Amino acid sequence: MNRKMLVAGSLLALTGCAGNVDAPGAGGTDDPEELETAPEPLRAGDVIAYAAETSHPYAGGWKQAITSPGATFVRVHFNDFSLAKGDYVTVSSPDGAQSFRYEDRGPNGDGDVWAFAIDGETAIVELHSSTGGGHGFSIPDIGHGTLAIAPVPVTSGEMMPGGISLERRPGGGTPDIVCATEGREAIACHDLNDQQRPVARLSFVRDGGMYLCTGWLIAGKNRNTLITNNHCISTQTEATSLEARFGYQHMDCLRSTMATYQRFGGSTLLKTNSRTRTRSRGGLDYTLIQLSGDPQTTWGVLTPTTKAPSVGDLINFIQHPGGRPKEIGFWRDDAHTLRCQIDAIDQTYSGTLSGSQIGYSCDSEGGSSGSPIIDAGTGRAFGLHHLADVAWLSCRNGGTEMSSICADAGDLISCVNN
């Protein structure tokens, strides 16, 4: 019988693990010929063609409303962006509540700019110049959001934002469901400020789509170093398109009030390690990116540790599931009686580096990829989440042990041993 049919038909009753669109792969084999579906990030929209440009050189200002009917958000993509000194471009919402400024040759100095997302279907692009004389820009395409990710109040364990009911099914194996019961809560339900502040929601462009993952600021050689999964971002082009939102969360446990958040762009891709093993290389599924600006001053860092996790260690699984405001996997059930913990160590899942994985029964979802798995006892990060349903019929999530990442990344990250 087909293995996936077996998973789909399983009546195994397990508690507290959500199916994860990021990572449908399962198994435990190192043989590339036997790997199941590789993990993919959560798709939030499409890149669609658009045609607009200034004159070259431009003479004075320029303004255009860019509307993509039905979009949940719009990201404007500029090519050949080059402005005269003192001139600048704003990308704003029609009411001006959201507005972002770009000048010179863009944040990375290369003339290729993915503007931050504007909620809704319209973004206003305006070139502010009194005299002109710069080259200008073209807009060859835009990001059209298809996923409704606006923050709204929810009832714990029953409804997700937007009123989408969650199917409860034991055993796992299917994306976008909660296995047995839902234990996640708004991050504000727990006083874990130092642990949660460095965690960000990531939005980026890849292969003609708009995608979402989670990432976090990690202590390292370079300030403002962010870590996420290789299966989220693996190239400089993807890193350059990154929008990282810090503080995107509710201020209260009932999720009634949103906090003020900040956005930072991606700059330099520092190092990446593939999601699966090829012969003796890869299989750690991580990427390190230096962000533009200085988010570290405001949001801090998490410290990675080479400390070996043990079965039974309690964990805090801080994440942006579905691209929603920050949540925490703290409990495995909505009755809040079963704590999230390490269930397996030194595992080999879906082509990963042999013995590099930890397993845990704690809810995740598409968009959770790249989240830190934090030792609740020390506040150190000892895992990087990237897989779900890692052990057949177990409904268990999986992460790469930070000790393996520390060994591979060298002095790019500053690891401790406790």
Image: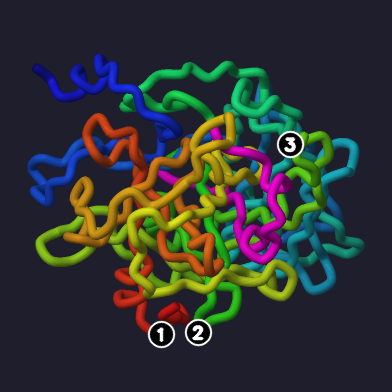
User: Is the residue under label 2 in contact with that under label 1 (CB below 8 Å)?
Assistant: yes
Under circle 1, the secondary element is helix
Residue wearing tag 3: 119
Give the position of the C terminus as an image quadrant.
Answer: bottom left
Q: Alpha-carbon distance for marks 2 and 3?
A: 35 Å
Under circle 2, the secondary element is loop
In magenta segment, residue 199: yes
Amino acid on which disc 2 is placed: Lys
Q: Alpha-carbon distance for marks 1 and 3?
A: 39 Å
Residue wearing tag 1: 411
Q: Which residues are magenta?
A: 183-207
User: Is the residue under label 3 in contact with that under label 1 (CB below 8 Å)?
Assistant: no
Vertical relation: 68 (above or below) 95: above
The front one of 70 and 356 is: 356
Residue at point 18%, 57% (across, down): 277
In magenta segment, residue 80: no
Residue 106, percent across and down?
66, 65
Which sits earlier in the primary sequence, circle 1 or circle 2? Answer: 2
Q: Alpha-carbon distance for marks 1 and 2?
A: 6 Å
Residue at point 53%, 57% (across, down): 215
| Residue 109 visible from this viewpoint | no
Under circle 3, the secondary element is strand
Which sits earlier in the primary sequence, circle 1 or circle 3? Answer: 3
Residue wearing tag 2: 221
Give the position of the N terminus as an image quadrant.
Answer: top left
